[in-house]
Image: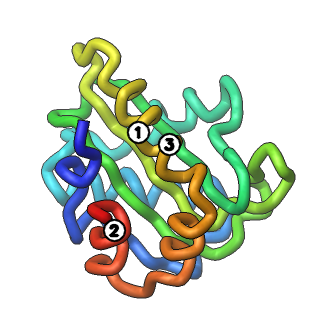
Amino acid sequence: MNIEQLITEELIIFDETIRSKGSLFDCLGRRLEASGRVKNSKKIIKDFLKRENETSTGIEDGFGIPHAKSKYVLEPTLCFIHSGRITEYVGMDEQPIECVFAIAVPKKSADEHLEILSSLSRKLIDPVFRQQLKEAVTAAEILTCLTE
């Protein structure tokens, strides 16, 4: 699976004012609905929060990969958000999350979210890739990182 096919410039968000999980998922839900990828932002926000309450999706080095499988998702989608440091959302290394790849897939999708998660995880192992994402300031730079 080519994850770069799941993301567009409109699904890449730079917003340093995001400092809580609530504002992160609110921003994510609104953007997904505005892009036509989901049909109900409030419901998809609830689906992301439900999954997050099961176990944190924070990984390490300031990255998180929240994901939701929902009947409100119209097509598999990847969204990137570079936020402020979210101190209530930490990775396994206890570092606050500041870069998020959010995965949203239709409920009827088999294991597509797992394929996307696996592909992203392989990329995020590379410290150079992570640093490039953290230093990027435009959507085009994020897309370039994903396609290299």
- Circles 3 and 1: CB atoms closer than 8 Å: yes
- Circle 3 — which element? helix
**Residue 43, percent across and down?**
37, 35
Name the quadrant containing residue 118.
Answer: top left
Which quadrant: the N terminus?
top left
C-alpha span from label 3 to label 2: 20 Å
Q: Earlier in the sequence, mark 2 or mark 1?
A: 2
Query: Is residue 122 or residue 15 the one in the foreground?
Result: 122
Is 62 placed above or below 137 here? above
**Residue 34, percent across and down?**
20, 59
Of all residues, the one furthest to the right in this rendering is 94
Is 80 placed above or below 124 here? below
Kind of residue sitting beneath label 1: Ser
Q: Which residue is mark 3?
A: 122
Where residue 59 is drawn, which disc sits there? none
Q: Nearer the viewer, mark 2 or mark 1?
A: 1
Q: Which residue is mark 2?
A: 12
- Circle 1 — which element? helix
**Residue 50, percent across and down?**
56, 28
Kind of residue sitting beneath label 2: Ile
The residue at the point 39 percent across, 71 percent down is: 13
Name the quadrant containing residue 76.
Answer: top left
Q: Which residue is mark 1?
A: 119
- Circles 2 and 1: CB atoms closer than 8 Å: no
Q: Can residue 25 be seen in this snapshot? A: no
**Residue 20, percent across and down?**
66, 61
Residue 65 in the figure: left or right of residue 10:
right
The residue at the point 86 percent across, 53 percent down is: 94
Query: Is residue 4 or residue 122 the one in the foreground?
Result: 122
